[in-house]
Image (cartoon, grey):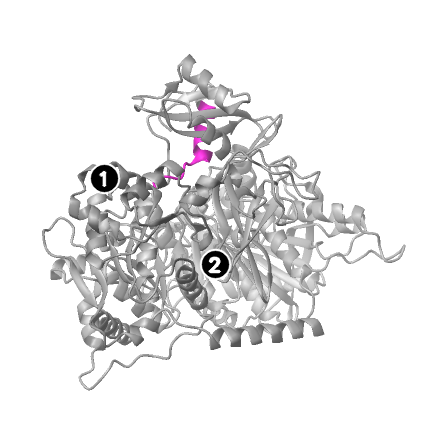
Amino acid sequence: MTASLPRTASTPSPASLPPTGLVGLDPAFSRLVDVPERDSSGAATGNTQRWHVLDNAAELDRLGVTPVGTVLCVHGNPTWSYLWRRLVSSATAVAAVASTTAAPAAADAPAPLGDVWRVIAVDQLEMGFSERTGRTRTLEQRVRDLADFTDSIGLDGPVITLGHDWGGVVSMGWAVDHPDMLAGVMLLNTAIHQPEDSPIPAPLRLALRQGVLGAATVGTPAFLETTLALAHPPLSTDVKRGYRAPYRGAVRRGGIGGFVADIPVDAEHESFAELDRIAEKLRHVDVPALLLWGPRDPIFSDRYLDDLITRLPQADVHRFEGAGHLLAEDVDYAAAVLTWLGDRAASEPESDADSVAADDDESMVAETAAGFRPLWQYLDELSHSDETALIEMVPSSGAAPRVVSWRLLSTRVSQIAAGLVKIGVKKGDRVSLLVQPGADLTAVLYACIRIGAIVVVADAGLGLRGLTRAVRGARPDHVIGALPGLAAARALGWPGQKISTVRLPSAAARALGVSHVLADIAQLGKRADGAPILPPPPAPGDTAAILFTSGSTGPAKGVVYTHAQLSAVRDALAAQYGVGVGTGLVAGFAPFALLGPALGARSVTPDMDVTSPKTLTATAVAAAVAAVDATVVFLSPAALTNVVATSDALTPADRRALDGVQTFLSAGAPVSEPLLSAAARLMPGASAHTPYGMTEGLLMTDISLEGIRSASARDAEPAENADDAPKSAGGGVCVGLPAATTRVLISALDDSGAATGEPAAVSGVTGEIVISAPHIKDHYDRLWLTNRASVLGTTPDQRWHRTGDVGHLDAAGRLWVEGRLPHVITTPDGVLTPVGPEQLIETVSGVARAAVVGVGPSGVQQLVAVVETEPAARRVGLASPELAAAVRAAVGQPVAAVLVVPKLPTDIRHNSKIDRSHLARWADRILTGGRMVRP
């Protein structure tokens, strides 16, 4: 499909420099370049075309610095080189700093600096301020145009390409044709291949319709204005003016229409073969790659990101949640690009020492494999046992609990595993599990793990919006769910083949897009003459699972675990709490319930709504304990609060069951001593513990109730040999000593509240908590920048994770958690962490719960206390003078305001982590004259 020239071809006009005064665009970078044209055979045509480009080469020369290479930037449609203005300016600013901090090797020779890059951003012909030739250009021609340009300026390697939209395709075409010069590939939202089973994006289909193309793209600025409206947040008027500058009038917009007309909608299109050539050759590009993506893109959705990842499996990937098609305007992409370039430049060629380290890594992998015990070990070892493996409590039906033996569970797992292989699920496929905790979820999870599929666990506790973000971000190949999960998947457009855990009516199955039923899959896996045939087991270093965080500090993050790391989680729990074969385990938190079979334990999840932990009652816990004769109970703090509140309903039989519990755990958020004590009274024979951990590391430290009682929250020790380090103001929640295989360090806070100190095990110093253990995460999924910031360093025998929590160590080596790093308050009197003051406020009569936040500019923030009262307030308001005075007296330092709310905002999963960042923004609005609305 090719549009006619009158609709889409440019009216010939010469190239020109952009007008002055366009926001963010330095005229010093603009220049015009005459480029001789060549035909497809490489012969000169005799024509010369003039390009407009942004180029910082002259500025680098003026600064006396030599770049290590060139970043070649190619815009898409309907933008121009203005898209890359920030990168050109930022790269030049970096060079200016470098020129003042690095002396040249000789007086007349600039020093090559690892972080200095030449940046060239072209306006493609017919676009921006480059020449309008009057021709409609195909993809093949545009790739050749770019090669003509780089040849004409004598560009030499190393070159790293950067493209967006259809400029990404053109840049990839140049990249695959110049392997000797190519040093890397960077892409923002783009596409290189259209899946055969799906149409091109709806906005493009509309633009390509007969009678629409010319009017929408050339005759009017509709296509341009629609694109500019895709920014999040909206573009300023001045920035829109910058993008509109080269396209004022239909005579200037022919290139926009030509670009749209050149979209290969089918194999008959003249640019289809070139697109296919580039897509296939991209699979053989083995240079470093960076993919920066905005998922709120109605044109290039995550399916195109998936395709690029399959072609560039070595790529670093970062999805900016909330950003969209105009990623270059939505986020600070320039900082991300320069950071990535800096990492590449800092990489040294492999030395003999690197070879030795690599050998050490291989030896360590071999040792790990030799001692590796897979998660399904007990399913194999106990496959002939009729002892109970798990019990599924049947909510509100009056039916007896469902008892599943080890023999039945092992058989079911093997059958489902073999059946999944037969329907096409393979090693490395992502499988999202939208199933309530119970026998089905357990069997499916272990079946997936056994065949090397990657399980994606985003529990319903994230809420529908959070769950949607998680599933779309993980891009599963298959979704296994019950009716509620499948209905949500269909309504919200979640990706992946749909598999139902229950048999649905034919009409419902068709409507939900269900391809298979779990029972049929298990039947497929059966063998009349023996055990199901399974593929070779995955290796210890293969990815096993993606577990999503609670989303309490922003969008939930996918945390990637290998098989070895998940097995290490199991081993840490077994060693710390003695959970093993035959142990009865009640897990009121889904991830721990799923570890039951890996531990060899008899496990049960009590009757509760997993989306609301506060629905768990004391009688439900007692029933679950009795069902498996449990000796170990794990509950989240939010669930624990309601268990204590409903304990009056316990019968004598319930209390006898609870008497048999030997170990009780509560984790996921700070647990107060009064709450833990109240729970301990319900289980008088149990040792009560509150381990500290996170999705990235499920067991880092541990403390018993006795340990909490013996610790003094007000005793902060002076720093050891660190007179200049920020001292802890005391307070916080004591979470005990590191677990057996865990190390804990503190990175001290500076005056701005940033964790800049060298991590050390020094007592009495408040800073970010840094942890290392065999069972911490491997990385964050498709969050390269986040992962980079979280990793302190990696050696063959040590991996460190920055937790984002702040706290201190005491003289006994115990860890105290004082809050989250983003919640640190920077007052005129110094840095303040929130948990200590909150604890003091919660001692005030009539205060049920408190949060402390800072409002105002960093460095001069004012302290604001927000409290829930007892009884609860009916509306938001200022605290009474008496309550405010009592709060200020308890804190002992200036408090600008005390606000009362009916309920503090908390995360969905735990219902206990206070969202202080949201609360700070809310309090700032209230105190600057905003309406007294609930946070």
| Spot occupied by residue 248 in the image (x, y as percentages of width and height) | 52, 40
**Pointer 1: residues within 10 angstroms few (<14), some, or many (20+)?**
some
First in residue order: circle 1 vs circle 2: 1
Viewer-nearest residue: 907 or 665: 665
User: Which residue lies under the disc numbered 1?
Assistant: 647
Magenta span of residues: 911-925
- Can you see residue 693? yes
Q: Nearer the viewer, mark 1 or mark 2?
A: 1
| Spot occupied by residue 566 in the image (x, y as percentages of width and height) | 42, 63
Badge 2 marks a residue whose secondary structure is loop
Q: Main secondary structure of the magenta part?
A: helix
User: Which residue lies under the disc numbered 2?
Assistant: 777
**Pointer 2: residues within 10 angstroms few (<14), some, or many (20+)?**
many
Check if residue 770 falls in the magenta segment: no
The furthest residue to the right: 107
Viewer-nearest residue: 471 or 717: 717
Residue type, numbered disc 2: Lys
Tell me if residue 583 comes above or below residue 26 in the rendering.
below
Please give left or right for residue 774 compared with residue 355 in the image: left
Tell me if residue 316 comes above or below residue 469 in the rendering.
below
Badge 1 marks a residue whose secondary structure is helix
